[in-house]
Structure formats: structure tokens, C-alpha cells
Amino acid sequence: MTRFIQKEIISRMFKASLLLICTFSASRGNVRLPNVISSNMVLQRNSKVKIWGWSNPNEKISLTTSWDNKIYQAEGTRDAGWEVLIETPAAGGPYTIYIKGNNSIVLQNILIGEVWVCSGQSNMEMSGNLGLKEIKAELPNAYNQNIRFFHIPKSTAPYPQKNGEGEWAGCDSNTLKSFSAVAYFFGKHLNNKLDIPIGLVAASWGGTTAEVWTPDSIVSSNEVLKAAAAKIIPSGMCPHLPGYAYNAMIAPITNYTIAGTIWYQGENNTITAGTYSALFTSMIDAWRRAWHKNLPFYYVQIAPYRYAAKHTGALLREAQQQSLSHPNTGMVVTTDLVSNVNDVHPQNKHDVGLRLSNWALAETYHQKGIAYKSPVFKNVSFKGDKAIIVMDNAESGLIIKGDVVTELFIAGLDQVFYPAQGTVKNNILTAWSKEVKNPAAVRYGFTDTATGNLFSKENLPAAPFRTDSWPVKTGEK
């Protein structure tokens, strides 16, 4: 036998072996699903939702939904992926989805309702495991299978991931202990008011900046945001590189149809407050592009706290206030929900969740008669020695809780601020000081620790504000 013939025989045997291996692998291939597509999940109601996963290339897949017995067909792509859009009904359940390829999968106990992503840093992450008394009080009656949790563990990745960890579970005294308290109270109120199932997807990480939740391409392509990100001081407790939390904890769920997002973050961006509004709104837009939807985005203004560098908290709150001009956003003010300004983690999570849910009920679900917007600064005029401040979202009028307005300051063109007196009538705040004959600017609650006592008649605190745009000195106290 010549050497050429020997090589030809070996080559044919090798090719035959490869064909046998590929044929055997194809016959044993399994349809697989991402973790977020599983039993016990909540699917967005009245929608075309995507069900997706992996399989062999060209594998034929059928999917049947029990609520209408409709059969959907899919086929594995050359990249071993598949997806199908299914139509969901009005809220209800439990339902079952049957998936058949080379193997069979049965997804059980599925509810149809409203799904929200709940993200941010430690004040969103805080749970009953951290000793919150509000959650402890909830535990005896926590069981509610119409509220479902999907908790995404902390993880990072340099590139966007297709799948991540986590599993769906019903709300009970065990699962509630480790779930976001803000998210829970938000979901509980929605469930009570809408009387439909609520799915809550929690993706939060204490100590993170908004940069790590923003795709790296957004930060790296903007010189201002890139320079600000470079100022972030790395911490051994959390990631600091742009996009790293987004890639591992948000990207894997962007195919999952949701109603909207709630967000509680900002404390770790106080050192870059000047660029936070641009960063935050860019992040919101990036998430909306990823979901292919103009998602409502309701967020919490950071609470009063004694930061090491003065005025940095006030400036971050101002940046959050500026972000309200971004479409389809809403902001919860928390100046009245703090009992200790030396604790960056206020214990009252119930009212934070309640106020977030009221934004959703009014703006997303169009329920009437809900007071949900805090009074915010609209404009100012000066008459003699007085400043006349008009407030938005105070149509029923303003009230002062106490004898005098606190945290109110006024200044002339010399930019020296003095404590001011104030009165309210309807939605107008009038301020003055005997030290300032010709006022040029007013500030209310514009310090790191200010709690304030100016409210709407609906008992919502006025957002801190300043009427000037003068440079603000920051630095160690």
C-alpha cells in the first residue's frame, strides 16, 4: 500500500469520525433556556414577549401556551440560538408553557402581570437580612404568590453576557428576607392597587457608581464622562469599571419584556456630581435602546447625609433634579424620611417604595387622584427686599411644618448667604432677610444634611433647590 493511499484512508476515516460525532451530538442536543425564563416567572401582560434560548442549529422547536393553546414554531440558527414572540393575555394565571425540541421543557406556575426591574446601589439592595424593622414586621404575613421575585446575584463581566444567574420565587417569609425592601414595598403597593400579579427583578450592588451600570461604549465615547469615570476611586467591595455590572446583571435580561424601571443610586457619584445628570440620562437612554422601549424610569433622590466633602450631596441632588427634564422619568424626594443624617442608609424603605409606586400608578397606569409629585422650584422674581418663588406641583398650596421655614437662605450679588424668613401662600414662597436689602438668590435645603419643612398640602416634601448658578465650593468640612 503506497503512502498516498494510506494517507487517503486515514483522511476518510477521520472525516467519517467527525461526521459520526456531529451526528451523535445533534441527536443528543438539548433546548436550553436563560435563567430568567423559568417556572414561577411573571410575564408582561397584553404584550408580545420574547421567549428565547439555545439549541442545535436547525433544530425544530415548538412552544405551546396553556392560556390559549396556541402553538409557536422556532428553529435553531447557525449560532445555536432561537427565539419566538408569544402573545400574552390580560393578567392572570397560573399558566404553563410547553417547549419541545430534541428534548422537552415544561414551564409551570407562570403568572401574567406587570414586571419591573429594580436597580441601584445599597439603598436599593438593603433587605430584611440587614435588620430592617419594616421587613421584620412584614414577615408573618408575607406570603403572596401574586408577587414574584427574581434576584440577580452580584457579578461582573468585561462584555455583555447572554445569560446570568438567578431564579424566580414567590414572595414568602423566607424569600422576602433577602430581597430588596424598596422593591418589595413598591411591588406590594402595585399589587394591592392594580390587583394583578407583579414580577420584581432586583439587580443592585452597594457602593456602585452609575458608570458600572452604563455600557462602556457610552462612557468611553464621551470625553467628559470618560474623564469623570477616571476620578472614581476603586473599592475592594464593588466594581468601578464602566459597564461591568451592566454587562453581567442587566444585559442578560434585556430580552425580557418589562413595564419599567425603578432606581435608587447616586451616593457614590457625589465626587462627580457635575457630570452625573449627563451620565444618568445617557444610562437611561442606553437601557431603553437595549429593551427597544421607552421605559418609564422612576428614581429616588439621595437622602440627606453628612458627606466628607461639603455640598457634594446637595450638588448630586441638584443633578438628579435636572434629570427630571428627561422624558418619561420621575423622582421621589426623601428629605423627610431620614432620622439620622450620619447614616447613609435611611431605615424607612416603606415610604420610598410607596412613593415610587405612586409615580407608576399615576404615570404608567394612569390612575387618577394620586398625589405623587413633590413641589419643585419653577421661577423666582425679586421685589424690593423680597424674593418671590413660584413652585410647581403645589396646586393645592404649600404648608410649613413648624413655626418658620427652615433651611432657607438668601443672598445679594455679593453671594453671601444669610438665613431667611419665609411665608407661603398658595404655591408661592416669599423669602427675605434684614441682612439682604437687594436679594439676588435664594436657596432652600441646599446643604448635604438639610431635611427642611416645606411641604405640599398632600404631605410631599419640597425638593431642595437654588435659584442661582454660582460656583459652589466643595471640599473637606
Image (tube, rainbow, N blue to C red):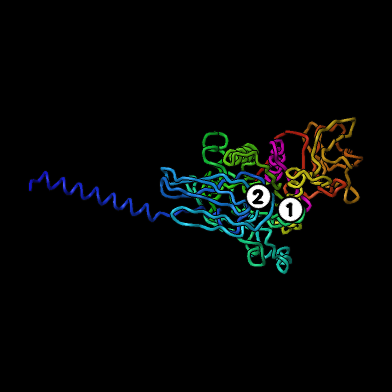
Asked if the residue at tag 1 contacts the one at tag 2, i.e. Cβ–Cβ closer than 8 Å, the answer is yes
Residue 20 percent coordinates (x, y): 29, 52
Quarter of the image holding residue 146?
bottom right
Q: Is residue 344 visible?
A: no
Crowding around mark 2 (Cα neighbors within 10 Å: few <14, some 14 to 19, many 20+) is many
Question: What residue does disc 1 label?
Answer: 190
Residue 82 percent coordinates (x, y): 48, 46
Amino acid at the residue labelled 1: Leu
Which residue is at a point 52% across and 34% down the rendered structure image?
221
Residue 362 located left or right of residue 67 = right
Q: Earlier in the sequence, mark 2 or mark 1?
A: 2
Q: Closest to the observer: 250 or 146? A: 146
Q: Farthest residue toward the bottom?
A: 140
What kind of element bears circle 2? Answer: strand
Membership of 325 in magenta stretch: yes
Residue 379 percent coordinates (x, y): 81, 33
Amino acid at the residue labelled 2: Trp
Q: Closest to the observer: 390 or 381? A: 390
How many labels sit on residues? Answer: 2
Residue 169 located left or right of residue 472 = left
Please provide the residue range marked out in magenta.
Answer: 312-336
Determine whether 466 is above or below 343 in the image. above
Question: What residue does disc 2 label?
Answer: 116
Which residue is at a point 62% across and 53% down the rendered structure image?
201
Residue 289 located left or right of residue 74 = right
Quarter of the image holding residue 275?
top right
Q: Which mark is residue 476?
A: none
